[in-house]
Amino acid sequence: MNSKKILVCGAGGFIGGHLVKRLKEEGFWVRGVDIKKHEYAESQADEFVQGDLRDPILCKKVLQDIDEVYQLAADMGGAGYIFTGDHDAAVMHNSASINLNIVDLASQMGVKKIFYSSSACIYPEYNQLDPDNPKCSEESAYPAAPDSEYGWEKLFSERLYLSYKRNCGLEVHIARFHNIYGPEGTWTGGREKAPAALCRKVSETDKSGSIEIWGDGKQTRSFLYIDDCLDAVRALMESDFEGPVNVGSEEMISINNLGKMVMDIANKDLSINNIKGPQGVRGRNSDNALIEEKLGWKPKLTLREGMEKTYQWVSEQVAKHSTVKA
């Protein structure tokens, strides 16, 4: 048993839930905290506290006797949540409040090091207008011009954590996640991201039907499977490299082609109906030069391998919750 005590903020979420599992496998004592319990799996944390990290009193309670913190808690979702503009005030206020509480109290309460999950959404929109040639190298973050308030809050919080490192001696490690996906993630309800949404749509549709994709479907992204993400996060935390560093895949694909990949996995020949909807930047892809140089990390799974695992899980959820529709 490792003697370190670890706090995972956002332990009821997709990445946080998987991270708790990984840390337990490695022998750590883990306390999880989230405003909600995990929807799809029982938490494996030694203690799970259900509560609101916007409340400094709760933050003080969960940080008690903790050596290391993984801060993944945020108000977030896919394009349907982030890019409509309807949730901007909540996203900015809720996520910033959590980060302000956690970093300040962690530095006061003797926490030795802290991981902060930032996002590829911090990158400037002006470098992501060409779907075939987006620029997302770490140093390209400035001059800043994120495409969403979610991205602005993440960039602010990166600077917040690094300020505490400089002024208070807190050891900080920051990763910019690029579209992490896999089983046990949100797959319905409006906050799901493209891989899970497409798996759900294909699974729900019979063999002669069609699925809807927002925009022209030519917007590009890269997607990283959850296990690869956790490998990178753990390598970063065990290193002396602070970041910020990209954690993502360099295997870029258009959303239409991602939809076709899911159809192929499902053995369904469906048509795509491109409709109006929020879609974010035109192109985004991880640039992994820095993480390979500093940590020697690269993804193990191809997108196809990860999507096969994800489709199997999402289709099981669909079967539990609904009947197939035309």
Image: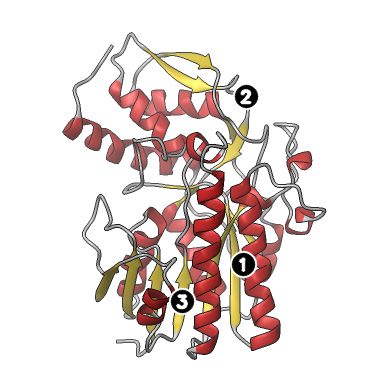
- Residue 13 appears anywhere in the view: yes
- In the displayed image of the protein, which residue is found farthest to the right? 143
Looking at the rendered image, the quarter that the C terminus falls into is top left
Type of amino acid under label 2: Lys
Query: Which of the two discs, 3 and 2, labels the residue nearer the N terminus?
Result: 3
Where does residue 283 sit, x and y in percent of width and height?
A: 67, 35
Q: Nearer the viewer, mark 3 or mark 1?
A: 3
Q: Which three-letter amino acid code belongs to the residue tagged 1?
A: Gly
Up the image or down, 258 lies above or below 74; here it is: above
Q: Quadrant of the N terminus?
A: bottom left
Report the Cα–Cα distance between label 3 and label 2. Answer: 38 Å
**For residue 222, above or below residue 289:** above
For the residues labelled 3 and 1, the Cα–Cα distance comes to: 23 Å
The amino acid type, in three-letter code, at marker 3 is: Val
Residue 126 lies, in percent from the top left, at 78, 40
Give whichever of discs 3 and 1 has the lower sequence position.
Answer: 3
For the residues labelled 1 and 2, the Cα–Cα distance comes to 32 Å
Which numbered tag is attached to residue 243? none
Q: Which labelled disc corresponds to residue 69?
A: 3
User: Would you place residue 30 above or below residue 110 in this image?
Assistant: above
Residue in the image at 25% along x and 64% along y: 43
Query: The residue tagged with tag 2: helix, strand or loop?
Result: loop
Q: Residue at x 66, y 59 (%)?
A: 155
Tag 2 residue: 218
The residue to which callout 1 is attached is 296
